[in-house]
């Protein structure tokens, strides 16, 4: 396997790394959601990704995409909040774009784009609405830029993780226009978005998984 290959094992390890990160940051995610939502984002993410790792443990996928479709389906069926269908749909869309046992950085970039498209289709949020999209969209742009410039998977994933964290921090001064936080109107200003924060964990987990092999 060269440094540009995504295989089934890497996909599974990525999902496990997300679960570990969510476990570690569960209270923080819930705390962020208690300020501008209903204080369940940490619990939702934890329930979903724990269920996903359990589902993957006795699953024999034959493609990279099967790992991600299974993850998405499990998130949809185990998480009640808005984030379950949004992340679940994104992982399913990514998976559907990766129907081979291995894939490269360019195709992985296209799969990440399909994931964002799914979130936007379902949630109808735009950049600047103070949602997970404000971390995802810059992460995708950074990944695509690196991949397009001939960067390998590790470089692209690292750039994406950094961009996601910048995007996450940039949600603080925004007023929410989608999801529960939008009910608060101007009172949502001054708080970091929980979903953008979990999206930053998803991309950091990818960078760490790729960097560790
Ligand atoms: P709920 O809002 O149902 O309690 P969670 O607390 O698990 O669900 O997730 C909240 C996060 O979901 C928000 O911080 C935001 O990032 C994201 N979110 C909510 N609505 C949308 C939407 N329409 N599009 C994209 N992301 C959204
Ligand atoms: Mg919530």
Image (cartoon, rainbow, N blue to C red):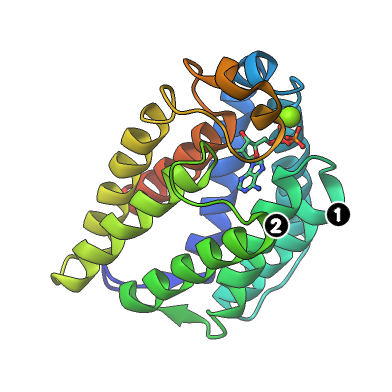
- Give whichever of discs 2 and 1 has the lower sequence position: 1
Res. 24 in view: yes
Q: Quadrant of the C terminus?
A: bottom left
Total numbered badges shown on the rendered structure: 2
Task: Name the secondary structure under disc 2.
Answer: helix
- For image coordinates 64% across by 23% down, the residue present is 26
The x, y position of residue 205, in whole percent, is 45, 43
Q: Quadrant of the N terminus?
A: bottom left
Q: Nearer the viewer, residue 17 or 114?
A: 114
- Residue bearing the label numbered 2: 88
Quarter of the view holding residue 90:
bottom right
Left/right placement of residue 109 relative to residue 63 reads: left
Image mark for residue 77: 1
- What is the C-alpha distance between the residues marked 2 and 1? 9 Å
The x, y position of residue 130, in whole percent, is 51, 36
Q: Quadrant of ligand 2?
A: top right
Q: Nearer the viewer, residue 32 or 75?
A: 32
Label 2: few (<14), some or many (≥20) within 10 Å? many
- In the image, residue 54 above or below residue 180: below
Quarter of the view holding residue 47:
top right
- In the image, residue 88 above or below residue 190: below
- For image coordinates 44% across by 42% down, the residue present is 128
Task: Name the secondary structure under disc 1.
Answer: helix
Res. 1 in view: no
Marks 1 and 2: in contact by CB < 8 Å? yes
């Amino acid at each position: 396997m060269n440094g540009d290959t995504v295989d089934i094992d890497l996909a599974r390890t990525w999902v496990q790394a997300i679960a570990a990160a969510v476990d570690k940051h569960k209270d923080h995610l819930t705390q962020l959601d208690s300020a501008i939502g209903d204080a369940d984002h940490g619990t939702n993410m934890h329930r979903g990704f724990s269920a996903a790792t359990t589902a993957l443990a006795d699953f024999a996928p034959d493609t990279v995409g099967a790992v991600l479709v299974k993850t998405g389906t499990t998130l949809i069926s185990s998480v009640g909040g808005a984030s379950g269908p949004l992340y679940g749909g994104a992982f399913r869309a990514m998976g559907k774009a990766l129907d081979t046992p291995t894939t490269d950085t360019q195709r992985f970039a296209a799969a990440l784009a399909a994931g964002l498209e799914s979130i936007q289709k379902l949630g109808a949020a735009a950049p600047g609405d103070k949602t997970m999209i404000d971390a995802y969209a810059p992460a995708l742009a950074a990944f695509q830029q690196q991949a397009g410039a001939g960067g390998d998977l590790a470089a692209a994933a690292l750039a994406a993780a950094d961009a996601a964290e910048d995007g996450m921090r940039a949600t603080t001064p925004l007023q929410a226009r989608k999801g529960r936080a939008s009910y608060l109107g101007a009172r949502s200003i001054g708080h970091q978005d929980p979903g953008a924060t979990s999206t930053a964990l998803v991309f950091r987990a990818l960078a760490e998984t790729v960097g560790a092999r």
